[in-house]
């Protein structure tokens, strides 16, 4: 179908394994939510949940969206949009949170 | 065909693939890249207002049903698997397989969307949290509503491809690229939900 891909894509069996991994990470996230409710892990809980979410994000983008197997320009394009959004909204969030605190 | 006409066709073809990537595919990647800005704005809006007190309740974080949303998230995650299996089947020219996985993806997407409709109905009817109850509720409905709309559009595209494949007995190479593009869109909707599930549902704290 696509002529510009250089590496062989995963097999259906490998896709199932990747999906199993994603399901396991989701289960870990939900478990962390309940563990935090009991033990109050605070920042550790946030760090683990954000890391788990980041891993799932990268696995879907890399394997299911085939970014690992595409020309590098695709990864650069996609990363640029993601990084731009993260930087822009980190600035917006910081500035507006400060403004809201000052208003209160 | 004359030499000139042939050259024009060749030039036209090269113009379309000067980057080495099919233009429609490059366009889809650009579109998805720009979508980060849309969802970034909606997530930022939610983070700003999710635990800002001083408004009448209830707040979204007080109402979340985590087991229910976890199952919904799992369903959407598995729809990414069926989508990639549809794409894989098509690369092996397994047309019936591609059709089956396409339909399965649309079905799983519909289950996710049904879950979202149920959640919204419960929040509005049972708990009285409407779009205008407080800023947190507005931000929540805007974010998850926009995501749900994206899922609904994805389902329409999936079912359209499935219908074309059924009617024509399979997808041609050109239509195969359509499946790849719809697949990219569908996976994008999934990764956005991965972020929403963690940031909005699992990490939200109701106002004190």
Image (cartoon, coloured by chain):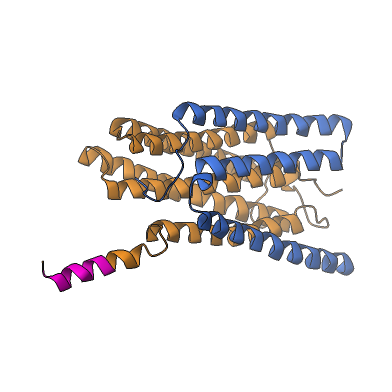
The C terminus of chain A lies in which quarter of the figure?
bottom right
Which x, y percent locates residue B58?
74, 47
Residue B8 within the magenta-colored segment of the rendering: yes
Left or right: where does residue B90 sit relative to residue B44?
Answer: left
For residue B115, what is the image quadrant? top right
Which chain can be seen in orange? B
Count of all numbered marks drawn on residues in the image:
0
| B80 drawn magenta | no
Compare residues B52 and B161 and report the one nearer the observer.
B161
Is residue B141 at least partly visible in the picture? Answer: yes
Q: Quadrant of residue B204?
A: top right
Q: Quadrant of the N terminus of chain A?
A: top left
Colour seen for chain A: blue
Residue B39 pos. (x, y %)? 61, 57
Q: Is residue B105 depicted above or below A5 in this figure?
A: above
**Near-viewer residue (B7 or B118):** B7
Percent position of residue B13, x then y: 29, 64
Residue B114: x, y in percent? 51, 38
Q: Which residue occupies the extreme left position in the image?
A: B1
Q: Which residues are magenta?
A: B2-11
Magenta span: predominant SS is helix
Q: Residue at x 81, y 29 (%)?
A: A35
- Tell me if B18 is positioned left or right of B55 in this view: left
Give the residue drawn at x 76%, y 50%.
Answer: B57
Is A49 above or below relative to A80? above
């Amino acid at each position: 179908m696509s002529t510009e891909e250089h590496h062989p894509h995963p097999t259906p069996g490998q896709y199932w394994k990747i999906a199993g991994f994603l399901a396991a990470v989701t289960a870990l996230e939900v478990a962390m939510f309940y563990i935090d409710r009991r033990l109050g892990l605070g920042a550790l809980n946030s760090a683990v949940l954000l890391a788990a979410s980041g891993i799932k994000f990268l696995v879907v983008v890399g394997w299911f969206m085939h970014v690992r197997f595409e020309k590098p320009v695709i990864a650069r394009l996609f990363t640029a949009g993601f990084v731009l959004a993260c930087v822009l909204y980190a600035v917006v969030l910081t500035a507006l949170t400060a403004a809201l605190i000052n208003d209160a | 065909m004359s030499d000139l006409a042939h050259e024009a066709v060749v030039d036209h073809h090269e113009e379309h693939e000067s980057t080495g990537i099919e233009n429609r595919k490059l366009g889809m990647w650009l579109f998805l890249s720009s979508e980060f800005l849309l969802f970034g704005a909606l997530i930022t809006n939610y983070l700003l207002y999710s635990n800002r007190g001083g408004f009448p309740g209830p707040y979204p974080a007080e109402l979340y049903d985590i087991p229910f949303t976890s199952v919904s998230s799992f369903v959407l995650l598995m729809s990414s698997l069926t989508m990639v299996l549809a794409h894989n089947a098509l690369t092996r020219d397994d047309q019936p397989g591609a059709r089956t996985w396409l339909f399965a993806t649309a079905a799983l997407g519909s289950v996710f969307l049904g879950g979202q409709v149920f959640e919204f109905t419960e929040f509005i009817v049972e708990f009285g949290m409407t779009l205008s109850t407080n800023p947190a509720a507005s931000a929540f409905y805007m974010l998850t509503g926009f995501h749900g709309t994206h899922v609904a559009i994805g389902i329409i595209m999936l079912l359209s491809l499935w219908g074309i494949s059924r009617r024509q007995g399979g997808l041609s190479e050109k239509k195969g690229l359509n499946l790849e593009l719809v697949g990219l869109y569908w996976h994008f909707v999934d990764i956005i939900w991965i972020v929403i599930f963690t940031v909005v549902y699992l990490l939200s704290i109701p106002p004190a």
